[in-house]
Structure formats: structure tokens, C-alpha cells
Image (spheres, rainbow, N blue to C red):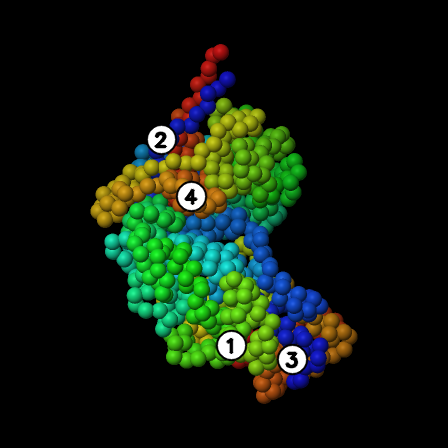
Amino acid sequence: MSNFKLQYLDTVGFNADQGGRGFHLPTAMAIREDGRIFVASRSNTAALNIVGIQVVDKDHGFFGQIGSYGHNPGEMMGPTALALDANNNLYLADDVLQRITVYDPEGELISTWGTEGDGIGEFNAPSGIVFDDDNLMYVVDHRNHRVQKFTKDGHFLAQWGSFGDGEGEFNLPWGIAIGPDGSICVADWRNDRVQRFSTQGEFLAQYGSAGNGDGELNRPAGLAIDADGNIFIADWGNQRVQVFDREGKFITKLRGQATLSKWSEEYFNAQADEKRSRDTFEPYFEVDTEDVNEISARIEPYFWDPVAMALDSDERAFVLETCRHRFQIYQKHSNTLQN
Amino acid sequence: MTLTKPRQDTALIAHLLRRASFGATPDELDDAVSRGYEATLDSLLNSTGDNDLPYDLIRRYHVDQSDLRNQPAAAAYWMYHLVQTQAPLREKMCLFWHRVFATAATKLIQGRVVLNQIDMFRRYGMGSFRELLLQLSRDPAMLMWLDNQDNHKRSINENYGREILELFAMGVGNYTEDDIKECARAFTGWTVENPDYMSIKMRNNTARPYGYISWQFKYDEDDHDHAEKTLLGESGDLNGEDALDIICRQEATAKFIARHLYHFFVADEPPVPQWPHTPPNDAEAIDTIVEAYFQSGYSIKEMLRAMFTSDFFKSETNRYARIKSPAEMVVGTLRLAGGMSVPSNEAYDAAATSANMGQALLNPPSVEGWQGGTEWINTGAYVQRVNFVSAVLNAPDRPGIKAIIQRIRTAAAHNYLSPAELVDLCLDILGPMEILETTREGIIEYAAGYGDISFGDELSSSHAEHAILSVLRLVVTTQEYQMV
């Protein structure tokens, strides 16, 4: 039996609505094998300078930004998903511009493709991307309730799914991840479940049902799958992360326990009055509401709109939170116990 | 134009729906007429409209309406509610209380806490006034807005104590300066969690490091003044709740709230600062509402019922007698056009339009709220109104506009409609509206440019559709359409 545990390590992030180091209302994340972490900030109309892909690492390094707000090639207006191919090219999905944009490892634009529509190869809100071992690409086509399969250059290969709540049907699917066995899991967002498919789109299994109990889901968003096949789910509507095993059985859940990032500490060191009052701050208190979104708005360490999940090669789990402009890092421990 | 008896009934129910709702589509009006005035009023008073909105979709597409920090996003979020709600009177009461208990995001910086206050109005705004005042006194946005986190046992801050007496419940002239101090003492210790850090984040206008933290009420027993106090002639170790009991027992409180309701729902009164010196326009009407307040144990719903069933409300002299507020104009027009799709950027545009017309939701200009009345209309605001309404109605694919065109097509049957018949039909559908005869003649002259219209074939139907949209756009520019 396995002794699965997630241990809190650190928080990276800072509200950068005024520009500079940090994120603003981020929605997507991808981790490269060398440890570079890409975070896409969607932001709002009052803070368009930060719309782009921020490049950071887990040790609070900040390496600049790829792309900016706009509709020209290389620019973005509604970033929703990031993924890396086998050559470390970076793929961005945009649900306003209805297209995929590809950047090389230096962040230079390679290509952009996709148009709005519901025909073959067209998009209505692309919202999740993943690559398989053959460097083929799967895009969650959110408002068309389907998954489309492409070559990495955007040549259409296959599609599956249609609107509904039956096996293999979707209601506004969002995140996507590929397991060690090559099967593909899709967060079927408005059906409150995760579905598993073969790379040919054959339905294999489904996990979860609507609710907030263990193993239940409320609008699951981002997904990641570890080397053991465990599925990490950003349980967005429940403001938590859940981990299911490869059979879809509940293993554990997290509510979040963020601490001040290095960027935040540096900020307070330069703001004497805020630092003094921050020292009296008690982040955890008994709340007088049952509204889980409002609870997340009140208790700063908790996840607030956990949207994307990623895992690195050292079995660290990264949870990106839209409304707190940061990601929390957890170390996976999974010792095999001998009976 | 003289209305026939059935149309008189329709006109009365349309009046109710303009005031207690945001107007009605022709189908909604037909439905209300078939149910009758009392039943329509009952459903307005009792609708809760649960599950009006797909919050998940809104939060997923508009991420700034998930954290709800900046005011345009928060105002857009409320605009979704206003336009889509199935409980329009409840939402209108939110606008009403937002005007009386005006709290602005400009000082508080975050829109979320002001929206939380609006949501509190949604839950308590038609219940007991005493309970509403209690919720208001515990409302974190209100506490921070009026600095009650600085109201301490050993050093009082009078802001909340003053405003609850002056602006929220009683009005100037019904209490003394000592009452203000004693009232403030009763609310010592009513604060928010982490008051120091929340205050400095607000003062420095910073959402760093991790965005805003939504505020929560906290009662700090150690900071509450337990010594004897005397408020409005009653003495004891008064806490905030005791103060509210005393305030709610006052005749002045009943009159003050009654006059506000009359001002908002029946006919414009002078600006609130003039109330201590100027008697109400209709003292008997105020007495009727006051009686309902005391007979029902301070029930706001029963005050509304007494008002909406009264002769003074139904009187023809009070119809089209108030100038539409920007929010009423924007929301009413969008509802007439069939609502908004969710999600869409139209919610932001609608909120911005209301702000440009002079009513920025969640951002009233001061603690006295908006005065309303003739202040809503100036040349710039009038142009904004006309442009917005014309743009919304010039969309034949909107479901509400389609329904209007279909209604005119049905009325025409297989016959031609003269310009006068077309104009009268449009006026009937948009109201029924009664406009100055000279204005009506002007619009008919304009409609004559299209000649008689019919729906015989595709070409003539298309021509008729153009004529209808043109007449509608002209009708909404009239002075009468600015009135409610």
C-alpha cells in the first residue's frame, strides 16, 4: 500500500497589477524540464501591461515576459492554457482570439493558427492543451464540447465528444492531462467529473460526481497526472485540490496554506507602515459564511480559484490560483510500505 | 389619446411594473394583466429569484468578476443581476438601499465588499427594518466606510453614530449632538477582523502581495464601552442592538423611511437635505406608509404593499412623473430587448453607460448618495441616454426586439399599417405611453417617410422591420421615455 502525502513547500507570486515582477489573475501554467515555469496572466482591462506569459522558477527567479496584450501574432487577449512539446516549444491557447500561438524556447513567435467556428480544426474557446509521447497535440475545445487532436503544426487528425452528460460527452470541458499509460484525462467542467479516454478518443472511465465531499467535484479545471497515475485535480468550484488514484479513488485533498513569497517579503521590507500592521495580521480566523468563494476571499493562505495544476520531475505539485496571483508548491511523498 | 377601459387596467399594471420592476416586455405585461394587479404585486413582493445567474460561467470567463476587486468588474457583476433577475423588486430595493445607505468603492478600494453589502440588501432589504439596520451595522463595508474600526471604548469616532441617525434612519432635527455621541458609544467594539492591516491596505490602496482580503465583522468585547448611556431619552448599558431598538421605535424613523420610499417609488420629493425644512408633498401618503411600518412590526415589505396598493400610488398624476435613474434606464431597456447573453461584455458596457449618465453603481458620489430627480438630466447625460437606448433597440436579432416586431406583424395581420397606426402600436407596446400630441404628430410625419407598411412578402417585411426600428428609436428619444 502507498503512504501518499503532500507536504507544503513554498509559495511563489505577487500581485503585479501595476506591472513588474509577479502575475495578475493568472489562468495557465506549464513547467519545462529545466525548471523554468511559464504562467499566463489574463488580468483585466485596467491592467493590460501584465497580460502575457511570465517566466519564473520555483526559487523565485523572474526571467521576464513572453507576449503582450493585443490581437497581432504573438499577442494574446484571453490566455487559457499552456503546454510544451517534445522540443520545448511553448503552446498558448486563447479563448478570445480563438487560436493557438507557438513560441520557441527563447520565447520568439513561431506560428499562430486557428479560427473561430465549430468545423473541423476550428475553435470556440480552446481551454486545455496536452502533448502525447508521439508529440501529437490534444486541444480541449471548450464551447464546442469536444477534444480535437492535431499534429504539433496544427494539422487536424481527429476529434471526439459532443454536448451532453453521457459517457464520452462533455459540458464545457476545461483541463486535460496525459497519464503514464498514455491515456488522456479531461476535466468535464460543467458535468463535475473527470473522464478518461484512449488517445483514439475511446471512453475508458469517469471519476467524480457533483458535490463537495471527498471524491466529489465542483467544476474541475486544471489536471495533472503523476508517474504513478495519480490524478491531481484543481477542484475550482470547491476551492481545493483533490488527488485521485489511477482508479479514480479519492486519496487526499488540500485547501491551501500559502506563506509570503520572497517577492512579497521584499515588498514589505520596502513598506514600513504595511509591514508593521502585517506583523499583527492573523490570516486564519473563524469565518461566518459557508460560501466557499467568500471564504477564500477572506482567508489569504487558502486557495482562491485554483485553476491549473502542474508537476515537475522531482514530484513537486504546483497549484496556480487566479485570484491570489501566485502558485503554491507541495512535495509529494509516496513511500511504499512493506507489510 | 384616450385609453379604453381595458387599456386603463393595462396602463395601471404597466405603471406598477415600471416602478416596482424595470418595466415589462409586451409578453410580461400581458401575463401581468391576465393575473391582475393584486396577484402581480404579490409575486413582485414575494419573488426570491434564486439561481438567477450562472455564477460559474461568469467567474470562469470574466476572471475579474471572480475576485471582484475593481469597481467596473463589480458593477458589471451587479448589472448581470439587475438585467437577468426574476425578482426585479428585490433588485430594485437593492438600488433603493444603495441610495439611502450609500457606500462607495472609491474609499474602500475593493468592489467585493460593497457587492457583499448589496447582497445583504438582497437578503434583508424587504424584511424587518430593525434586522436590516442590524445587518448594516455589522456590514464590513459600512464599518470601514464610516471608520467604525476607529470607534474605541476610550476614544470614540462619531461617524457611524452620526450617520445612522442623520442619514440612515431618522433625519436631521430628530436627535441631539449628545445622542450622536451616545449612539457612537453603543457601537464601540463593532469592527472587522484584522482592523489595522485592513485599514492600511485600504489607505495605501494596495492589493499587494496577494490581492484583497474580504472583510469580516468582528465584535471586540474588550473594546466595547459598557458604561451607562442615554440615547433619545432611554438609558442603560446600551449596546448597538439596544440602540437599534430605540431608533426603530421612533416616529421620526418611520417617517424618514416612508418618505424615502415615496421619493423613490411614487414621486420625486425635494433633495433629502431639505427635508427638515420642507414638508412632504403628500403628508397623508407618508402617514399611510408609517402606519404600515408600526402595524407590521417594522416590515419593509408591508410598507411597500401599503404604498403600491394605495390610491396615491395608482393616481394618474403620479404616472410618468419621475425621471428614470440611469440604472433604471439601462436595465429597463436591456430587459425590454430580451436581456443579455451570459457571459458577454455587455454587462461592462451597461455599467459604464450608467456611470457615464451619472450613476456609477457601487460608487455613489458621497455618503448622501444620489439626489436623483432633475439632477439626472443634463445635455451630456441626455445624449448618452438616447445613444445607448437607440443602439440597444436597433438590433432586430435580440429576442425582445424580435417579439416586438412579431407583435406588430400580428396586429397588422394581412393589412397595411398606416404611419399613425404604426406609431400608436409602438407607443402601446413601449408603455402604453401617452405622449404630447405634437410629439406624436412629429413621429407620424417621420414614419410617413416609410409609407404604409405590410408584411406581405420578404421585401415588404424587411421594409416594415426598418420602419418599426426607426419609429422605436425615435420614441425612445422622447421626453416621455425618460420618465417612469
Q: Chain of mark 2?
A: A
Outermost right residue: B414
Chain containing mark 3 = B
Q: Which residue is mark 4?
A: A287
Of tags 1 and 2, which is closer to the observer? Answer: 1
Check contact, mark 1 vs mark 4: CB within 8 A: no
Q: In front: mark 2 or mark 3?
A: 2
Please identify, in this view, whether the residue under mark 3 or under mark 4 is nearer the observer.
Answer: 4
From the image, tell me which residue sits under label 1. Answer: B267
Disc 1 residue crowd, few under 14, some 14–19, many 20+, Cα 10 Å: many
Q: Distance between the Cα atoms at labels 3 and 4?
A: 58 Å
Residue type marked 3: Val
Q: Nearer the viewer, residue B447 or B74?
A: B74
Disc marking residue B369? none
The local secondary structure at tag 1 comes to loop
Query: How many other residues sit within 10 Å of disc 4, few (<14), some (14-19) or many (≥20)?
Result: some
Crowd class of label 3 (few under 14; some 14 to 19; many from 20; radius 10 Å): many
Whole-number angstrom distance, CA of label 4 to CA of label 2: 26 Å
